[in-house]
Image (cartoon, rainbow, N blue to C red):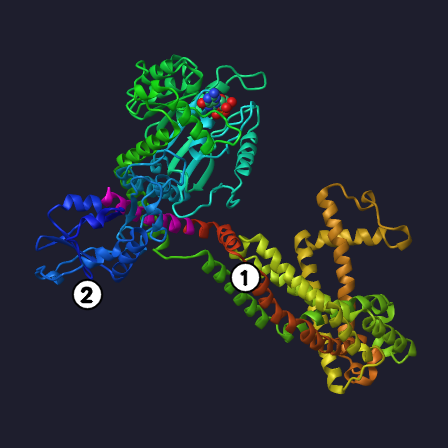
Amino acid sequence: MLVTRFARRPLLRSPQMRLDQRRGILFIPRAGFAAVRWTFGLLGIGAGAAGYTAYKVDENVQKAVPDWLRDSLGQAKDWMASIDLSGVKIPELPSIELPTIDVTALPGWKDSPALAGPDADGVRNFQAMQDPTPVVNKASSAGKGVPGNSMSPPDQDLMVLTKKLIEVRNLLKTVNNNSNLQLPSIVVVGSQSSGKSSVLEAIVGHEFLPKGSNMVTRRPIELTLIHSENSKEEYGEFPQLGLGKISDFRKIQKTLTDLNLAVPESECVSSSPIELRIYSPNVPDLTLVDLPGYIQIHSRHQPPTLKQKIADLCDLYIKENNIILAVCAADVDLANSEALRASRKVDPYGNRTIGVLTKMDLVDPNDAVAKLKNPDFPLQLGYIGVVCKGSSSGPGQALIRAEESYFKSHPEFKNANASVGTPVLRNRLMKVLEEHMGKGLYRIVDQVEKELDDARYQFKVHYNDQKISPESYVAEAMDSLKTRFKAFTKEFGKPQVRDAVRTMLEDRIRDICDEVYWNDPRIQMLPKICADPVWATRLDLTFASLTKSGVGRSSVQLVIDTLLQKMEDILSTDQFAHHPEARAQILQFSNDILRSKFHVTVDQVENTIKPYKFEVECSEQEWQEGVKRATALLDSTLASDESELKSIKSTFGRRRLRNAINQIRKYEKDPEAGPATAAELGIESERDAKLFASAREALRLQKHISTLQGRLGALRSRQCAVSTNKSCCPEALMEVLADKLTYTAVMFIYVELLNEFFFQLPREVDNKLYYDLNRQQILKFANENPSVRKHLEIQERKATLELVMEKLRSLNRKH
Ligand SMILES: Nc1nc2c(ncn2[C@@H]2O[C@H](COP(=O)(O)OP(=O)(O)OP(=O)(O)O)[C@@H](O)[C@H]2O)c(=O)[nH]1
């Protein structure tokens, strides 16, 4: 890493420094390197040349350095005059690889006039382009943040690690909650009202934690403070809730209060943490966990186990790796501090515990100083005293100033060189966390490496390293839906629609003929008696019954029902079974399109079949076709009746069935008398009941078969061979009519309904479902499919761990 520090005085003290503008090389004399390093602050791999250390600088630096100096120092001209290479011997520089410094790309370059600001040392920190990470906490040292929080330059370099590891921690949180992959946090423990919230708020500079006497901290609050270098904005985010940026800290407080109070009083505490991130230029990079305060006694409404529950929850957090911030009120005997007692159990040598004595203003300064030494439980990281008394303006700068003035007004603290004040606490926390993070770096690198190996293995074994994205999955699902739909449109052409409509009409003809003809006992002789005009009238009646039975509406409805059923089938495949919402939406689109076409199609069909209501022309050929179709229909009905009768006979045996039929005939001869009783028939068991039910069915079938045979005979008779004898063969004419109705209806159904539906549905799916999805919805859709979710999870996990590993490796190198 190459770090450059610019100070106000430096360059003028190094008159021998040279800038070769042509070659873009800056030379700094080797003799007095330490002075140069301090003043100009160029640190790095230098290339030796004739007693100089040479740095390659880019064009911007050449232009920008003098400008900047002119602006901020007003003495650039003198310095520029000293840029002279004459007389300096530089052997073979071009062969040497030199670090490049781009000052203009450095963070803070633009506001460089601040260098001339009130800060006495005037030290600004910049980082060379080899490491774009801004050096942290510049704001506080530049006097912008909470006063008194400046850090010495080495501290600032050190703090980079915390920032980076907080990023790593947040990344790791997105892939798992594996405790192995957790980085250290600062855990705040203390008795109720010891001042924990006040300390945290003083560190953040805002009032944001839940307040009240009703035990308002019921869940751990995992607080991540993120120092935002280049932004003035201060805001919080609850990553679990997805509420976005919240700039009003009262809203943050309200949300935290609501989340805490959602834990019922009967339980009082929950171990499920609330995550809160605060971004601000005035906070250091820290991760802290606020925990419910230890209690001595529980109230009437609280469970008797509460004390233990709180202690257990705190124990969970003060375990290995975390830093314990033991908050104790100075006006209470430290020997009774629950926080120190708990920390001593897990950290007996005080290696990772920082003691914070709050309410220092409530005790005599000499006693306070003595307490800070606490010989009973000495801590390696020490005790720090603070005064965080609530001020009307909140825990901002006024509070810090009040604290500062309190400690200044009591020389006892200065005389004893006591560690006091919130800024000192902040700095201590940053340093300790950084050191801890540094120590844990190798461990976490190892663990991440193991996790990454596992993720890579899983990805290879289960998915053959094949990458997918939620977007590609959605596209693929929609494509496959459209492909299946297209295949269906090909299958469901005019012939198929005609078949469906004709079958419906034939069913209707059968019902009408059943009513008008087949119950008439003379029907077997119809070919012989059909010259009687009564049969012509009957034929007209049958004809009108069909044409006026709402053929238009029912055939359109039939097609719509078939289409909707088909859509359900298409959407019931494995893939869409995972997406009930999308499935319902697509069915709704289908329904909407079809409904919007329903009336117009029905009207069209009804209009075009109107002429058939009065008359149907029938050519000889059409008649022959009608006879043929009617014969085929009757043949197939006859075959099915006969097979049914055969199966009944074989189930019960011919003799038993015949006896049962005879028994029924005997007792049911007189239709007036109604069906025979069980006793008359001799029904004694369930099996007998079944036998007689089947015998009745056999009787019905026998009768029907006889009619069918009669009708078939008629159709094959001489009279039915010509179209002039329509009254002799009503079913033949009805077949001709059904064919004409079907043909006409389907033609219009196809144009008005089917074509529109086949065209519109894929577009509707694209426009309303596919293109309309936002990223969130795409993710939701993809995650609905368990196998895709798993694939994405492992892929995501692998990618995140790779990113983490990259960051960790780079940190490791620098560390
Ligand atoms: N005089 C004085 N009062 C303080 C100081 N710090 C906190 N207090 C007061 O002590 C009371 C409790 O402080 P909190 O910060 O709410 O304590 P807590 O530990 O978070 O309390 P719980 O969340 O209830 O456990 C409040 O009234 C604060 O104003 C201090 O340094 N001096």
Compared to residue 351, the image places residue 479 above or below, namely below
Task: Give the spatial CA distance, label 2 vs label 1.
Answer: 58 Å
Report if residue 793 lies within the magenta region.
yes
Q: Tell us which disc is closer to us: 2 or 1.
A: 2
To which quarter of the image does residue 69 belong? bottom left
Marker disc for residue 361 = none
Is label 2's Cβ within 8 Å of ligand 1? Answer: no
To which quarter of the image does residue 619 belong? bottom right
What secondary structure is the stretch in magenta mostly built from? helix
Report if residue 185 lies within the magenta region.
no
Q: Residues within 10 Å of mark 2 (few under 14, many from 20)?
A: few
Q: Residues within 10 Å of mark 1 (few under 14, many from 20)?
A: some
To which quarter of the image does residue 706 belong? bottom right
Q: Amino acid at mark 1?
A: Tyr
Q: Looking at the image, which is closer to me, 118 or 621?
A: 118
Q: Is residue 108 visible?
A: no
Q: Amino acid at mark 2?
A: Arg
Q: Looking at the image, which is closer to me, 691 or 351?
A: 351
Q: Looking at the image, which is closer to me, 311 or 156?
A: 156
The x and y percentages for residue 258 are 57, 33
- Give the left or right position of residue 380, taking residue 144 as reference: left
Compared to residue 441, the image places residue 692 above or below, namely below
Give the mark nearest the N terminus, 2 or 1.
Answer: 2
The x and y percentages for residue 83 are 18, 59
Q: What is the quadrant of the C terminus in the image?
A: top left
Q: Which residue is mark 1?
A: 770
Dot 2 falls on a residue whose secondary structure is: loop
- Give the left or right position of residue 370, taking residue 85 as reference: right
Residues rendered magenta in the picture: 792-815
The x and y percentages for residue 359 are 44, 20
The x and y percentages for residue 634 are 73, 71
Q: Which residue is mark 2?
A: 22
